[in-house]
Structure formats: C-alpha cells, structure tokens
Image (tube, rainbow, N blue to C red):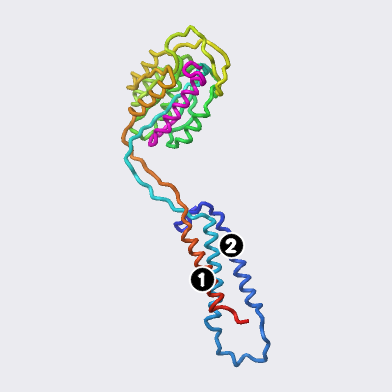
C-alpha cells in the first residue's frame, strides 16, 4: 500500500492511528475536570492570561500524540524501493519438453535414480544458471501438458520441475510431436529474438496426434530451434535393467526399447538445432552446459532492486518527541504542587 509516496508492508497497522481520537477526547474532558476554587467574582482576573506555560502543556500533549503516531507508522513498516533500470544482457526464451512416460523409470544411467530423476536434477541446474532467460516447461507421455508458461521466476520453475512425476499424465506412451507443439504454443509469444525448445526423451514417437516431423516443420517456419536429448541406450539391450521409483527403490526389471536416434536427429536438423545422446548423468550435464553456451542473444531487461525498510526517520522522531516532552514536563512546565 502506498500513501503520499510512502509504501507500507503492513498498512492495516495504520488503523491504530484511530487510538489518537479517544486520547484527544480524554485530554479535553480531563482538562475541564481539573480542581477549581469557587469565588464570588472573577472580574479582577479578566485581563490576566494563562501565560505561555498553559499553552506549553497543550504542546506537550500534542508531542506525545505525534510520538505515538510515529510508533504506529513504524509498526506499519514503511519501505522504499529502488527505481527500475534497464540493462543489456544475454538471454533467450527456452521451453523444456520433458518425457514422463513409464520407461523413464529405467535405472540404466544411474544406479540409484531413474532416468527421470537424473533428467530433472540436471534440468534444474540448467534452469538455475539461466539468470536472464524466460523459461517454460512442457511434459508429455501419451499426450502433452503445458505445465509452466514462460517465466523469469527460476525458483518457481525449479520447484515445479522437482515435483514432476511419472503418472502425472494418465495416457502412457511417447508423444514427441505433441510435446513439441505444446512447447511451440508456449514459446511463440516470447519477446526474445532467440527461441529454443529442448526435448528430453528416452523413446520413439508412438502416441499423439501430431507427427514429430510435422511439429519440427512448424518450429522451423517460426524460426524456433529444437534441441533433442536422447536419455538412455541407443542400441537394443540384451539384459534387463531395474525400474526405479522416485525414492530409488527397485520396482521391477525389464528390457527397455532403444532411442530412435534417427528421428531425434532429423527433428534437430530440420530446425537448426542439435541432437545429443545422454547415456549417463555426466553426459547429460555436459549437454546442458553446451546448450547453455550456444543459446544466448542480446536482451533489454528491466531490473528492480530489493525492498528495504525505511523506519529510522520515524524512530528518531518518536525518540526526540518523547524525550523533549519528558524534559520540558519535568523542568519549565513542571506543575506547582
């Protein structure tokens, strides 16, 4: 809340200023009930004034009220903000498309975590490092779901990303084309010149209504680069691998299908992006580092600095007013017994 140019963190505390009304009323009533002396006539005192000490007593009361008002203002927490500033930084618009199909439970790239857990951890690190970017998130399995729109709030995006689980989308499968289209819908309104989509998947397209090639053509026409990351093995595996839950517990063992590297390579090539193979957690981390260095462009960013409490002036006013009235009350304005 802003009042006369002053912003308050707890504006409701200002209602306490109403306490001054009964204080003033009590002072006026009390003043008329002071001890009196009955005499037959006051004619002899008609030209005698109360003197400056009488008025000083009223001033002291006003100072006490003003000091109380200052304390109430301090309780309301007056604050100041720095001005908006514009800076030229390197940034871009990026939407991450994350595969959350059942096969992402495979624990072949990390002994303690499944593919999704590793992808989420590295993606969160990537998000944390993109200070000036607008980032979004799309998840897909048998169908796609636009989870987080473009935002510069990295903490919010990371929290959502960490909460993503397999089963969030009931339809199982891998709808890569639908995932790309959902990402395009998120990123097309972005203001950055450079726009990129990062698709993280462990399978081949087997669900959805849009073919990956069609989605890639749409992205190409809109000058959006699509980077594809294949998580897991690219060759058929003869041995069963463990399927791991979110807590690292082994659920089952099974043979996982290989990544359709050719399709992912075509998607990336059509849009001017690049395909990466992530057969380990370390490789996946290195891939994100490379993308981080590739996808940057000049952006004009508006910055707003942090808020600071600005109560010292009011605290000093309250201290001075209480101090001065206390000294005056016990010296020159001291009542005679």
User: Residue 194 appears at what percent x and percent y?
Assistant: 34, 30
Query: Against 144, is 38 above or below?
Result: below
Q: Within 10 angstroms of label 1, few (less than 14), some, or many (20 or more) residues? A: few
Highlighted magenta segment, given as a residue range: 107-136
Q: Position of residue 125 (x, y in %)?
A: 43, 30
Q: Residues within 10 Å of mark 2 (few under 14, many from 20)?
A: few
Label 1's element?
A: helix
Helix, strand or loop at mark 2? helix
- Residue 116 in the magenta stretch? The answer is yes
- Camera-nearest residue between 158 and 42: 158
- Asked if 324 appears above or below 232 in the picture, the reply is below
Q: Which residue is mark 1?
A: 324
Could you say which disc has been placed on residue 83 in the image?
Answer: none
Q: In this view of the protein, can residue 143 be seen by the observer? A: no
Q: Sequence order check: which comes first, mark 2 or mark 1?
A: 2
Residue found 45% across the figure and 22% down from its top: 179
Quadrant containing the C terminus is: bottom right
Residue 246, how many percent across, how many down? 55, 23
Disc marking residue 18:
2
- Residue depicted at 57% across the width and 17% down the height: 250
- Residue reaching furthest top? 238
Residue 220 horizontal side relative to residue 6, left or right: left
Q: Residue furthest bottom?
A: 44
- Residue occupying image coordinates x 55% and y 21%: 248
């Amino acid at each position: 809340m802003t009042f006369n140019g002053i912003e308050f963190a707890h504006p409701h505390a200002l209602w306490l200023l109403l306490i001054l009304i009964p204080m003033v009323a009590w002072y006026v009533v009390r003043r008329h009930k002071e001890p009196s002396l009955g005499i037959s006539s006051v004619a002899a005192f008609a030209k005698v004034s109360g003197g400056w000490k009488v008025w000083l007593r009223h001033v002291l009361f006003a100072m006490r009220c003003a000091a109380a008002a200052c304390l109430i203002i301090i309780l309301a927490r007056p604050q100041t903000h720095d001005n908006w500033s514009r800076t030229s930084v390197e940034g871009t618009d990026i939407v991450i498309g994350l595969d959350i199909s059942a096969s992402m439970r495979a624990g072949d790239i990390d002994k303690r975590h499944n593919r999704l857990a590793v992808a989420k951890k590295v993606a969160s690190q990537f998000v944390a490092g993109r200070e000036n970017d607008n980032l979004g998130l799309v998840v897909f399995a048998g169908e796609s779901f636009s989870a987080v729109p473009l935002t510069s709030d990295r903490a919010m995006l990371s929290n959502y990303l960490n909460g993503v689980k397999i089963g969030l989308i009931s339809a199982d499968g891998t709808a890569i084309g639908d995932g790309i289209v959902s990402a395009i819908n998120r990123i097309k309104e972005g203001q950055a010149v450079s726009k990129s989509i990062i698709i993280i998947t462990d399978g081949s397209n087997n669900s959805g209504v849009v073919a990956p090639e069609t989605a890639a053509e749409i992205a190409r026409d809109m000058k959006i680069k699509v980077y594809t990351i294949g998580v897991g093995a690219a060759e058929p595996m003869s041995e069963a691998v463990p399927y791991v839950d979110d807590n690292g517990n082994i659920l089952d063992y099974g043979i996982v299908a290989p990544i359709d590297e050719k399709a992912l390579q075509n998607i990336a090539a059509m849009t001017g992006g690049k395909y990466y193979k992530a057969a380990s957690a370390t490789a996946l981390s290195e891939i994100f580092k490379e993308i981080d260095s590739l996808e940057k462009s000049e952006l004009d960013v508006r910055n707003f600095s942090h808020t600071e409490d600005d109560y010292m002036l009011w605290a000093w006013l309250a201290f001075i007013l209480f101090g001065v009235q206390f000294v005056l009350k016990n010296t020159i304005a001291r009542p005679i017994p």
